[in-house]
Image (cartoon, rainbow, N blue to C red):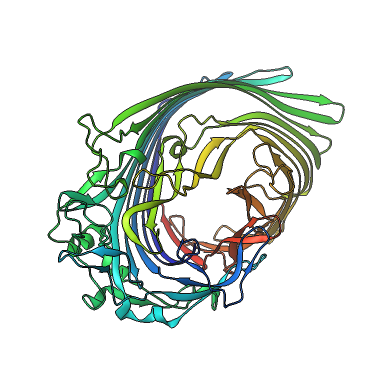
Amino acid sequence: MFSASSQLQKRERMGVNASAQWKLNDSFTLTGEYFSSDLDIGTDVVSTQYWTDRPQESLVLTEAYKISPTGFLEQGTINSNFYQANTSVQTEEASSKNFAVTLDWDSGQNLVGQVKLTSAKSDNDWIGGASDVMASQGNKIKFSDGSEGPVNPNGVSSFVYTLDTPLGAEIPVIETSGALTDKSQYWYKSQWVESKDTSVTANAIKADFSYMFDEGFTKSVSFGGRIADKDVDHTEYRFLNQFGDYQYYFKDPQIVDPVAGYTLLPIVTYNDNPSRLIEYGNFFSTSSGKFPSSILVEDPSHMKDQVTWLNSLYPNSPLTKAVTPITSYAVDESTKALYVMADMEAEFGSYYLTSNIGLRYVSTDLTVVANEVPAVLADGSNNNNSFAGFNGTEKEWTPVANKSSYSDVLPSINATLALSDEFDIKFAAAKVMARPNLNNLGRGFNIAYTGNFENGGPDGRFQRFASGSAGNPSLSPDRSTSYDLSANWYFSPGSAIIAAMFYKDIESFSVQQSSQEAIPDSDGVVRDGGVVSRVVNGQGGSVLGLELGAQHSFENGFGIMANYTYSDSENKDFVDPTSGESLPIPGVSKDSYNIISYYETTQFNARLAYNWRSKRLSSLFSGYPRYTREYGQLDASFGYNVNEQLAMSVEGINLTGNDNSSYLDVGDGEYFYDWQTDETRYVFSISYKF
């Protein structure tokens, strides 16, 4: 399937921060800090779909067509009896509140200390409504009067489109017939609403102490500990309407009620309600000529309040907000950490050495609560409030806790050898650990279905499995050991030239693996299956690289920075199916650089930055490596301090509107996977200090 979409997003953020400090006496100072943020995001997405894998669709043999040696369609004319477009309206409200209380202690002698309490709470509420409109006739179904036929006889029985996506093309070209522009042929196929609520609470207490020696090689020893707890509660919902004895998530009249033997949902065409369908012009405007310049979709302005919109379509069908247990979860992460670090200094003739050696111990206790959902209840009935799993939610489920614990000992060393006032050599080595993303730990198996097109045409007997994704409660942390060596020349104040080498030995990291799996369709029968993406622990890899950088600040406030990085990586999980060689670490580009010019004074600041990176591996898709192409982006920002309290800034992101695309390396060339362009975004900010 090829799909094209246009997205319009609006963001509004409001933030407040405050701090207060109280010197209790000569030894103790108390500091309180507060920060809160509210973010509202509104997103409208319209899309169109062109299917190439429906059984009833085929290349028109009277037209020229081309298939690559590995079986990928490059050019052809496709005759289809299925065309639909989609509107999605999403609303997201995110809020966070952060508190911190710090007590600093200074004995007036060699020992100082600090105790800090932090508490953070964030909530994210997301809701999305979607609507499919279809120009095709739709499934052949039974009606209440006993007759049979397509849902929308006025729709097109078939339409022809041409596809041109030769190997190496960054974006395909799709041309359609004029039949899809006739509003009278459309009907409102399916509507649905879903929502997600996520709350995160994090509390921590830490204590840090430092003892300074009056003499000797060791200048100070720091030590301390931290206890933290983080709770995540994620719940997903479907909004269900009742028709007959069953609940419906997808309000689609192609779905036939198994008791009545015919559809219970109203069939609404454009002629029945013309106000819902609009022509969305300027579609895919950043790539003129690649796709149709306009498409017909449900009007997104009617869908801003998703629940009200859904109720207006089905006022006589009770609406229920039901939990989706298989994609809901909770995670509790408790950590305890201790550390000790020594700072040392020594002179060797005209050379001066500073270093620190540290050791950190971290213990993590993890509880992931997912829901176990039986297919059949104790009384033998189906555990679903609809007659098919894809269209309802489970009635009963049991929370199951998966507990695990792990600990890490993490040594580190940093050393700087100053050969003169202008030149030094730095060395660093550390063992590091990054905990798994909590969403990857908790989320269950999420399934997407599509219509059944067996026996030469669409019908509503069952839904075919299209794709799936799943988390993994048994994920281990990402672990690695890194080494860095650099030479630095400080040739004037605020200016330097740096050359560095680095090596990272990666023990393990989380990877997305996509593969074809034999997953059953909605009726429980395994047919074609589909692609499932799962998060798993990788076997590790390595990165060896070189970095060159320079910075120079002029006396008039202007400055320039430049940096180049070369990274040669390989991993033990992904192998190129054509060459048999190891593939790079996902997300690591071999070459990257950035150039930044800036101007800074007490009142003004301006910055112009260009960042570029070469292609990078994203994942594997059906065994083929998927690469994101090389990408460069130009950004700019300008800030003005009106006075000591008021400051204003404007930021321009992707000023040149560059494209971002990826492809599959299929052995005999690069085959299109996806393409995205982001128009220039502008961010305006105002801050005021009381």
Residue located farthest toward the right when viewing the structure as drawn: 349
Residue 164 visible in rendering: no
Left or right of 381 in this view: 332: right
Q: Closest to the observer: 484 or 404? A: 404
Question: Percent x, y for residue 401?
Answer: 37, 26
Provide residue 170's location: percent of width, then percent of height: 62, 66
From what the image shows, is residue 428 above or below residue 10?
above
Where residue 155 appears, x then y in whole percent?
33, 75
Give x and y (percent) for residue 474: 48, 29
Q: Residue furthest left?
A: 316
Judging depth in this view, the residue of 486 and 422 nearest the camera is 486
Question: Which residue is more in the foreground, 222 or 187?
Answer: 187
Q: Is residue 464 visible?
A: yes
Residue 543 left/right relative to 115: right
* Residue drawn at x 56%, y 57% as measured from the top left: 602
Q: Is residue 517 above or below residue 69?
A: above
Q: From the viewer's perspective, tell me whether residue 97 is left or right of residue 416.
A: left
Q: Say above or below: 254 vs 295.
A: above
Name the residue at 24% across, 57% down. 256
Total numbered circles: 0
The answer to whether 518 appears left or right of 75 in the picture is left
The residue closer to the viewer here, 490 or 236, is: 236
What's the residue at 66%, 52% (across, down)?
616
